[in-house]
Image: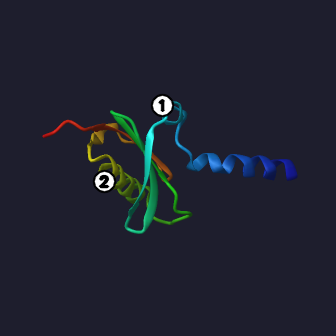
Amino acid sequence: MARVLLIFALLLPACTTPSPDFIWADATHRFETVNGMAFKVYWTTSHAQAVRQTGYTRLPVQLLQARALVAIARVTGCRVIRRTVRGGAVRTDARINCAPG
């Protein structure tokens, strides 16, 4: 039982880190708060990822994801391409379009 708890404790922080693509790309990142919920947003020229930093919440996944998309748009200054949105309650990925207009 102790081994299971140790493994769980070691893997838990992985939920709040960006995906390897953003780590290897040395992606730019910044914190953003939307309606009292903190996100760390990572982005490259065409992709972005918001990782929720706020702890447990009972909000529906759709609402959490909507707040993550607002954080991405605010931080990057780009338009989120809705059909590319993937993720869940903790991490949301999307392609972004930073072209003017």
Secondary element type, mark 2: helix
Quick check: 87 above or below 70?
above
Image coordinates of residue 51 in percent, x first then y, are 48, 50
Picture residue at 44% right of the left edge, 46% below the top: 29
Q: In the drawing, does residue 7 fall left or right of residue 87?
A: right
Residue receiving disc 2 = 74
Picture residue at 64% right of the left edge, 50% below the top: 13
User: How many numbered discs sit on the rendered protein?
Assistant: 2
Picture residue at 50% right of the left edge, 31% below the top: 21
* Separation (CA) of disc 2 from disc 1: 21 Å
Residue receiving disc 1 = 25
Q: Residue furthest left?
A: 101
Image coordinates of residue 97 in percent, x first then y, are 25, 37
- Which quarter of the figure has residue 48? top left
Residue 1 visible here: no
Picture residue at 42% right of the left edge, 69% below the top: 36
